[in-house]
Amino acid sequence: MRTHTGAIMPEESERAAVDAPVVAFPEAIQPCPVCGQAMTGRQTSACPDKRRAAKSRGRRAEAQAERGRRVCALLETAVGILNGET
């Protein structure tokens, strides 16, 4: 197709393919391996330091609480044995 200036213009369907907006595909968004939230911007391996540190503190606190529960259970068992209970 030629315009009034003599330039060759592509057909409308060809221009539509070039002018189409770029859409980010959901499968292209990677979840963070640490927290599972979608990584944004230039993040490629893990979430930001603050969120990663917060998750680490949470995991440490949960591990400490679990150790505390196990120690309590062992102490209750030991007290039961010392008192003659089975």
Image: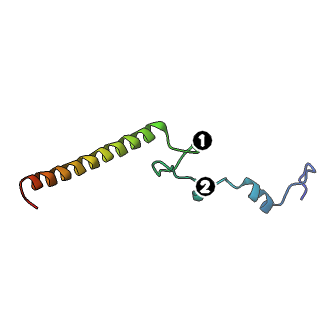
Q: Which residue is drawn at 58% across and 42% down?
A: 41
Q: Residue at x 52, y 52 (%)?
A: 31
Residue position marked by numbered label 1 in the rendering: 42
Please state which amino acid type lies under the numbered disc 1: Arg
In front of the other: 47 or 56: 56
In front of the other: 66 or 22: 66
Q: Which residue is drawn at 31% across and 47% down?
A: 62
Q: Is residue 13 left or right of residue 84?
A: right
Name the image quarter holding residue 26.
Answer: bottom right
Check the picture and name the quadrant holding the N terminus: bottom right
Please state which amino acid type lies under the numbered disc 2: Ala
Mark 1 residue crowding within 10 angstroms, few (<14) / some (14–19) / many (20+): few
Mark number, residue 28 = 2
Q: Residue furthest right?
A: 6
Label 1 secondary element: loop
In front of the other: 35 or 9: 35
Mark 2 residue crowding within 10 angstroms, few (<14) / some (14–19) / many (20+): few
Q: In this view, does 81 lie to the left or right of 58?
A: left
